[in-house]
Image (cartoon, grey):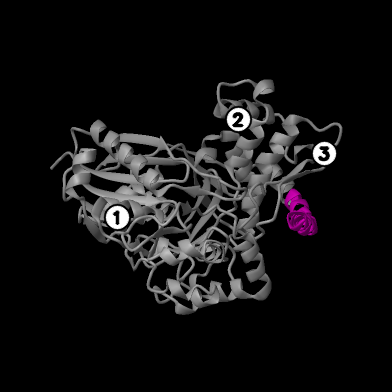
Amino acid sequence: MTNVAYMGVDVGTTAIKAAVYADGGALISLETRPSRVIRPHSGWSEQDMNEVWRVTQDCLRAAAAKAAGATIASIGVCGQGDGLWTLDKDLRPVRNAILWNDSRGDDLILGWIADGTSAKLSRFSRTSNWAGTAGTAFRWLKDNEPDSAARVEHVIFCKDWINLQLTGRLATDFSDGTIPFMDLESRAYADEAFDLLRIGELKGKVAPPQPSNARHGALLPPVAAAVGLSAGLPVATGAIDLGAMMVGMKLDQAGDVGLVLGTTAVVNAVVEPEPFRGEPIGATLAHPANHRWIRVIAPLSGASAFDWFASLHPQSLGGADVAEVAARMSDLVREIPPGANGVTFLPYLAGERAPFVAPHATASFHGLTARSTKADMGRAVMEGASLSLKHCFRSIKIANLGHALLTGGGARNALWCDILASVLGTAIVASDASDHGLWGAALIGASAAGLCDLESRPVRDEKTRVHRPDLRDAEAYERLFGRYERIVAASRQIWDAQRAFERGQRAN
């Protein structure tokens, strides 16, 4: 079967993608559709689960049609992680899914940090809890929508919802199931984790975990007919999107590091399982390909910070869309020296969850004077997001790293890659490809069908660029990082005061 092909699906927060790959990784077809995020109140982030499935079907149908000459032999799905995706006794959505970037549970998180609950919870999943996890979101639901909470019979994750529609079967994998209830050492849910959050009624209602490349089920005939695929196709259990991305980038050995500069910025470091040594920074996931763990340090702002700043200047910069405006902003920023002429930016546009949890943190410029320019501020935004990643590296003690692989929209910005290399003091191997999660999901699906071994999976040809640190710039950024840390420390009092003021306003 020389034209055998694998299908991958990536169900993201703002976009859903389906792709078909040849055995060696060559892309045969790719289809992308926008996915709608619903924000009924400030800080809320939801999606209509049925709508997510409809959009996914559209992607599957279009990708399959474009790959009509290939024999698609398997399906693997990855998706956005965390959040609260709930089903009733009839396997229907209880309500809109509460997403990973929802902040309605911020007060719960701050209370749990203060009373030590978060530290105790981290003993199991090795993760610093935040508002967008299933535990926090369900506790909010229990306190604020008790009727909805009472109807919950199953808690799943995004890709599990899609797999349920594809196969009629319900399960999750270890990578998605890690946070916040799993004991990573035993790879089983910890009863105490539910009890700590006072949501013991969820015990037995969280989907049972299994390996990402387990054969989850077979494509149902009605679904196959609707999307133009063969009934009975093997479907893998799948993985969280970051886990699938690590599979797609072939990062599975201890010491491997992958960076994402997308909507959010992410540091992914592969580590061996280790004893608990106190509350960790960021999150930990079970690796989809082996027994190792992925330490995930994920600030809430990445390329989105630069897109936000560039979008404020469409008229003065020109450009047909945000991407073109951002490209012109990069050209403007290129002439500004390291340090942005004294301007420093804290990139906490959506609060922060790593390398510290501060849902009430806010973004800010520091060092502005009458001489400061738009270009200074644009450079400071790029540097601020990069310094945030350096803060993450320092927090988990990554040092003397030979190189790091970089993907995401920011990886296509050569200037930003140069800045990041000098800020981190390491070579950045940047890929223009943005489908590592899709390719990883396809490989996981192929493995479930017995068509490839995840440990010795193929490495596809991929165009990359190497950005090496400039020694003088690296020295300047090391000094600037000290200033950045001091500003962050001093800003905590401002965030606390602002939160107290806002709570007082709501009370009145």
Disc 2: CA contacts within 10 A as few (<14), some (14-19) or many (>=20): many
Magenta residues (range): 479-508
Tell me the quadrant of the picture where the N terminus can be found: top left
Q: Is residue 305 magenta?
A: no
Mark number displayed over residue 368: 3
Inspect the image, locate mark 3, and give the three-letter code of the amino acid beneath it.
Leu
Q: What x and y, as percent, mark residue 122?
A: 55, 72
Inspect the image, locate mark 1, and give the three-letter code of the amino acid beneath it.
Leu
Residue holding disc 2? 326
Q: What x and y, as percent, mark residue 398?
A: 58, 60
First-in-chain label (2 vs 3): 2
Element carrying mark 3: loop
Q: Nearer the viewer, mark 1 or mark 3?
A: 1
Inspect the image, locate mark 2, and give the three-letter code of the amino acid beneath it.
Ala
Q: Residue 216 sits in which quadrant? A: bottom left
Query: With respect to residue 336, does 121 lie above or below?
Result: below
First-in-chain label (1 vs 3): 1
At 78% across and 58% down in the image, what residue appears? 504
Mark number displayed over residue 164: 1
First-in-chain label (2 vs 1): 1
Q: Residue 202 sits in which quadrant? A: bottom left
Query: With respect to residue 180, does 50 lie above or below?
Result: above
